[in-house]
Image (cartoon, rainbow, N blue to C red):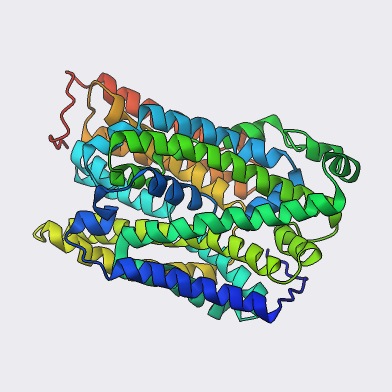
Amino acid sequence: MFSQDISVTLHPIDYGIIALYIVVLFGIGFRFARSKLENTEDYLLAGRTLTLPGFVATLVSTWYGGILGVGEFSYQYGLSNWFVFGVPYYIFAAIFAFFLAGKVRETNLYTIPDRLYEFYDRKTGLVGSLFTFLMISPAPYILMLAVLINLLFGWSMVLSVIAGTLFSIVYVYFGGFRSVVKTDYFQFILMFLGFVLILMIAVSRYGGWQFLTSHLPPRHLTLSGGNSAQYILVWFFIALWTLVDPGFHQRCYGAKTARVAKHGILVSIGFWGLFDFLTTFTGLYARAIRPDIPALMSYPVLAETLLPPVLKGLFYLGLIAVIMSTVDSFSFLSAVTIGRDFLWRLRESAGEDRSQYYTRIGLVLTGVISIALVLLIPSVIDLWYTIGTLFIPALLFPLLSTYFSARTISGTGAFLSSVAGFGMSAIWYLAGMMVMHNGNPQYPLGIEPLYPGLFLSGVVYLVAYLRTASPDRSVDRRRA
């Protein structure tokens, strides 16, 4: 997948800039790692003290870990990148802000599985933990970071994978979520700086909109990018991911107030829109200037074409910062899921104070498992699509109903709804993958697998809902 038939030439000063970044990042991360962590709340949620700037910086910077994939899509389909990977996520993020953020914050919980454990029962919490873990594995982003390290330094992929993992999680081991947030401030600045610089130089050297319209295929300047309506529509449904995204929930749990959570998401939408503008138009310039390169490498190739020393180093810092901010956040979320929501839950006799210990074990396990996955499956093609297709149907109805339903369903009903949604999507997906045509899966009846998964999960949930005798909002009852 990762065609790297390009050469990167960095000036020694560029290497110095990257080395300085690592030193500063570690300095920030370990500074807060050394601060006293008084309890589990401090380690997992930074003591629930996130103010608006911290909330925005950490939420915005962790949303773009697959930055090379964004460049690939922009290079291939143009403005459609903004329409497919931007607009639907803005819509559902706004829905989350207005209807969910405050409710999530007021629960004073730690994770999505916590909500499922408390609202339903043990088996629903366990299966929810499994699906949550699979949704937030940092493996694809570690792979993306390893590709960039390999490209910049010429290290082997094995060494690049190990180095990328260690660079991204070592300070998180000691400082928890507080270290994630503080390093995200730094990475937030770098990600915007890098793309502002390269886009300004591209415009100044080649011109603006008129240059793009005369050097791009017409489809690149349309919202569809030449893709079918059903393909675009399924991405709008995949944007439902936002409503069950563990990162959104974690930051709302950690917000100082419900108001901070709501306004933080709304402000973040503005920054996402700006960053999508920068990344999409950078991809367009890459396609217009260098129409014969591997799409995945469009950003690095454009940097090699346009940027002099120092600026090139700063741009690559922007790419590295985008990916690392996602790797450390997803690694920590995965660690909480493995360590706290699995191991700690299985040891019911362990006190709450031990969940921090199990989370650190989970972080080590996450790193090892992610490295193994990357080395065994070195591909990120269609990963966002596949993960969204399989796990949104599994979590959407059981989780959202805990905030909006005036009537609880049984734990068994929630469990069956979750498993049915995942099972149906998985069967539909595998059936399509077994019948390929021109490299594309042929799904039964021509229907994308997300839809039957959502349908079956919704039907099972509805049946369980109708069988519930009386309204009850209690989240303390655990029913089989």
Q: Is 427 positioned to the left or the right of 476 in the image? A: right
Residue that extends furthest to the right in the rendered view of this protein: 214
Q: Position of residue 459 (x, y in %)?
A: 39, 26
Up-down relation of residue 206 to residue 99 (above or below): below
Q: Is 142 positioned to the left or the right of 286 in the image? A: left
Q: How many callouts does the rendering have?
A: 0
Q: Residue at x 25, y 41 (%)?
A: 115
- Would you say residue 161 is visible in this rendering? no
In the picture, which quadrant includes the C terminus?
Answer: top left
In the picture, which quadrant includes the N terminus?
Answer: bottom right
Up-down relation of residue 12 to residue 411 (above or below): below
Q: Residue at x 60, y 78 (%)?
A: 16
- Would you say residue 414 is visible in this rendering? yes
Q: Position of residue 332 (x, y in %)?
A: 36, 60
As rendered, which of 136 and 210 lies closer to the eye? 210
Residue that extends furthest to the left in the rendered view of this protein: 349
Q: Position of residue 140 (x, y in %)?
A: 53, 60
In which quarter of the view is residue 447 placed? top right
Q: Residue at x 79, y 53 (%)?
A: 202
Q: Residue at x 26, y 50 (%)?
A: 126
Q: Position of residue 147 (x, y in %)?
A: 62, 69
